[in-house]
Image: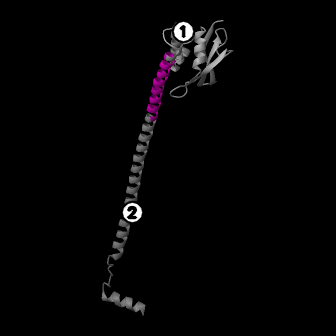
Amino acid sequence: MPVKIRLQRHGKKGKPFYWIVAADVRSKRDGKYLEKLGTYNPNVNPAQIDLDVDGAVTWLQNGAQPTDTAKAILSYKGAMLKNHLVGGVRKGAITEEQAEEKFQAWLAEKEAKVNAKKEGLAQAKADVKAKALEVEAKINEDRAAAVKEAADAAIKAEADAKAAAAAEAAEPVEEKGPESIDDAQAAAGEEA
């Protein structure tokens, strides 16, 4: 029975989530499988991959052929390297301890690369957030300055209006005196 290591799609529309499975080539893509080896979530950055490396190596040793995408995932997680090292141990080229030491060194190097990428992404996100905060602070300062200018202009306009009213009230009012003596006497007669 020919066996493939392939992806089985799960998840909703637009948000795929995959199981990495060993399945008979004649079964449907999302159908019956022999063994679930792990999961692959491409929706996060970096992609989240959980893989049973030893189980994958066992299937590879038994002749299972990975699909292109599955092979890339197996290489990324080190299953292909471990399969290669196990082949070297079986042929007697290296000892099992040397193979395990090489594999652990490779895993440590790979983990450092992944952590560096995560830190870079986190730093980029923090930089974008800091820049947005800086822009927002500048906009708030500009708004505060505009409000202060408007308030100062209103206060100045009110002060000018009060000064004009006070100046108008302080102007001496000229009393018009009688133009002639006859008018003065007529006015006096009316009062009496």
Whether the magenta-drawn stretch holds residue 112 is answered as yes
Q: Residue at x 64, y 13 (%)?
A: 23
Whether the magenta-drawn stretch holds residue 176 is answered as no
Above/below status of 127 relative to 54: below
**Which label belongs to residue 155?**
2
Which quarter of the figure is the N terminus placed in? top right
> x, y percentage for residue 43?
55, 27
- Mark 1, residue position: 90
For residue 170, which quarter of the picture? bottom left
Q: Residue furthest right?
A: 32
Q: The disc labelled 2 sits on which kind of residue? A: Ile
> x, y percentage for residue 154?
39, 60
Secondary structure mostly seen in magenta is helix
> x, y percentage for residue 98?
49, 16
Question: Magenta region: which residues?
Answer: 98-122
Above/below status of 103 relative to 131: above
Q: Quick check: can you spot residue 64?
A: no
Q: Residue furthest bottom?
A: 192
Q: How many marks?
A: 2
Q: The disc labelled 1 sits on which kind of residue? A: Arg
Nearest the viewer among 190 and 60 is 60
